[in-house]
Amino acid sequence: MNISLQIGIQIIFSAVATMGYGIFVNIPRQALLPCGCSGTIGWLVYWYFVDFVHAGRVFSSLVAALIVGLVSYGWARGFKMPATLFNVPALVPLVPGVPAYQAVRAMVMGQFVNSVNLFIMVILIMGAIALGYLMAQVLIDIVHRY
């Protein structure tokens, strides 16, 4: 598949997922487009690190969550709204839904070793997302102090 077509598909679906979740949690209309941009930027960073750098899902999630936290803070300052409006929906595309489903499916089918491995991967990815967002907040606080 052509790389520009892949990028277009990734942009469209990540923006739709982010803005759809934003609509679901009832964020203001003027925050929907920047929220979709935050989610798209985060997903493109994740996708780049996984597919082109081959960095692994955990590190890619960490970097993407860091970027989402920084971009969301920028949108929050620009639109004079809470950063939570931009970062919570933007982190949704990074949530490891497929590995979580595969872990539960493996457990139901009796593949306990594979299930435990997948559950550990899900926990590591979720921890990386939380740590990446935390790192963004710490960087923002450091910049504000100096």
Image: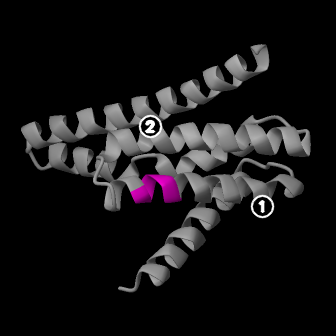
Q: Residue at x 55, y 48 (%)?
A: 92
Residue 38 horizontal/vertical position (percent): 66, 52
Residue 12 vertical placement versus 123 (above, below): below
Q: Which residues are magenta?
A: 44-48
Which amino acid is tagged 1?
Leu
Q: Which residue is mark 1?
A: 33
Q: Which residue is tagged 2? A: 62
Q: Please, what is the dominant secondary structure of the magenta stretch?
A: helix
Which color scheme is applied?
Answer: one colour
- 41, 85: nearer the viewer: 41
Distance in Å between CA atoms under marks 1 and 2: 24 Å
Q: For residue 119, which quarter of the picture?
A: top left
Left or right: residue 120 versus residue 141 is left
73 to the left or right of 11: right
The numbered dot on residue 98 is none
Residue 78 x/y as whole percent: 87, 44
State whether residue 108 is above or below residue 125.
below
Quarter holding the N terminus is bottom left
The furthest residue to the right: 80
Q: Earlier in the sequence, mark 1 or mark 2?
A: 1
Secondary structure type for disc 2? helix
